[in-house]
Image (tube, rainbow, N blue to C red):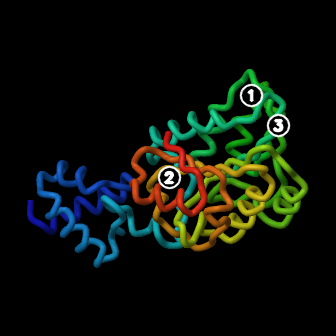
Amino acid sequence: MYAEERQQAMAHAVAARGRMSVADLASEYDVTTETVRRDLSTLESLGLVRRVHGGAVPATALTSLEYGLAERDSARVAEKEAIARAALELLPPAGGSIAIDAGSTTIRFAEALPRDRRLVVYTHSVPVAARLALNPAVELHLLPGTVRPTTQAAVGPETVTALAQLRVDLAFLGTNGATVGHGFSTPDSAEAATKRAIVAAGRRAVVLTDSTKIGLESTVSFAAVDEVDVLLTDGEIASSQRKELVAAGVEVVVA
């Protein structure tokens, strides 16, 4: 395989999988890690990938582009399910209250909620609500607002006003990016306003995200790192990223 062909294949692989490590690319294309790093530098200069610690992510993951829910739901399924299961350990006792944000990982969290523990749940996400409506232990409250087709979640002044009246034990959120400098972020300002209100509504806030979002910055910040109590992610988070986030004031839990 010529270098140009290999680089094209790498770009397609990174785009399809969301993130690939240098070691995985070296193994898949039977080249040295030094060759992979040179290839990734070339691809980054062409705007096809973005290099991150230990590998690469699609270039579009670091712009204002926002993938639809169906596309995001099919990526890194095993990691998201592990994060969702681990989040169950943080649930309040029976009778407690939680708010659940929109997102592909929070949908899996909603699906995993126990059917034998009574919980009061508030959400602005139509897919989350659809799953919880089938759970006999959940007292479900669907928040008002205008539903965005991209995330299938209600946003806008009505949503923010309704959230401002709430105080729940725990708020579970998704994110499109997480860095110490820019905090937790998302591409859309209306989504950011809703997420900000969800953080404020919770006595504690928990962000559920796979490790590909860590180190990325989306357009609008909805919470500083120290405004979130727990960041729950998968085992591919780089140790340097974890240390930096912990030093900034958030507890990092690995599923």
Residue in the image at 53% along x and 61% along y? 247
Give the x, y percent position of residue 169: 79, 43
**Count of labels shown?**
3
Q: Secondary structure at mark 2?
A: helix
Residue at which label 2 appears: 71
Residue 52 can be seen, yes or no:
yes
Assess disc 2: are there few (<14), some (14-19) or many (≥20) residues with their C-alpha within 10 Å of its C-alpha: few
The amino acid beneath tag 3 is Val
Answer with the quarter of the image where residue 226 lies.
Answer: bottom right
Answer with the quarter of the image where residue 13 lies.
Answer: bottom left
User: Residue 135: which numbered mark, if any?
Assistant: 1
Q: Earlier in the sequence, mark 1 or mark 2?
A: 2
Label 2 vs label 3, nearer the camera: 3
Give the x, y percent position of residue 163: 84, 56
Q: Earlier in the sequence, mark 2 or mark 3?
A: 2
Assess disc 3: are there few (<14), some (14-19) or many (≥20) residues with their C-alpha within 10 Å of its C-alpha: some
Asked if residue 223 is positioned above or below residue 13 in the image, the reply reads below
The amino acid beneath tag 1 is Asn
Q: Is residue 177 left or right of residue 230?
A: left
Q: CA distance from mark 1 to mark 2?
A: 26 Å
Give the x, y percent position of residue 91: 70, 35
Q: CA distance from mark 3 to mark 1?
A: 11 Å
Residue lying furthest top: 116
Give the x, y percent position of residue 234: 46, 45
Q: CA distance from mark 2 to mark 3?
A: 29 Å
Asked whether the residues under the numbered discs 2 and 3 touch, taking CB atoms below 8 Å apart as contact, a structural biologist would say no
